[in-house]
Amino acid sequence: MKRFFGFALLVASLSVPAFAAKNSQNVTFTDAIRVGSTQLPAGDYKVTWTANGSNAQVTIAEKGRASVTVPAKLIDAKNGHVAVLTNTVGGVEVLETIQLDNLSLVIAGATGSGE
């Protein structure tokens, strides 16, 4: 019984990172971009999210820099690619949506509509 419990514990501990990896993706911002009230320089970022139904908290982090967390709507979508959609507001590129292979993260309030 102890051997089975140890094996089950090992399998469970190895599967946790696999589940966590499903809620993260690397993206590249080719230009400086505003996320919420924070201006981020162009670069490679890791996007992670936690979801409660269609509501999500999205964290965007670049190695060696502070991260930015913003609310978003999670939409199931078969995008088949990774893309970043922006809108120019007052001469500044504002992040609106991050499209990933199987979902889209629509940043809340990105266009000023409060969505």
Image (tube, grey):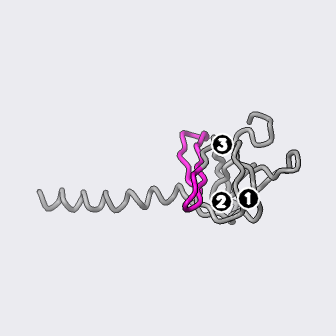
Q: Which mark, by number, is residue 100?
A: 2
* Alpha carbons under labels 3 and 2: distance apart: 13 Å
Q: Which residues are magenta?
A: 47-67
Q: Residue 108: x percent and y percent?
A: 70, 40
- In this picture, is 103 found above or below 44? above
Type of the residue with mark 3: Lys
* Image quarter hosting the N terminus: bottom left
Q: Name the residue that disc number 1 marks.
A: 84
Q: Is residue 63 magenta?
A: yes
Residue 32 image-quadrant placement: bottom right
Pointer 2 or 1: first along the chain:
1
Badge 3: residue crowd in 10 Å (few <14, some 14–19, many ≥20): many
Could you say whether the residue bearing mark 3 is in a helix, strand or loop? strand
Q: Residue 75: x percent and y percent?
A: 66, 47
- Side (left or right) of 106 relative to 6: right
Type of the residue with mark 2: Leu
Badge 2: residue crowd in 10 Å (few <14, some 14–19, many ≥20): many
Q: Which mark, by number, is residue 74?
A: none
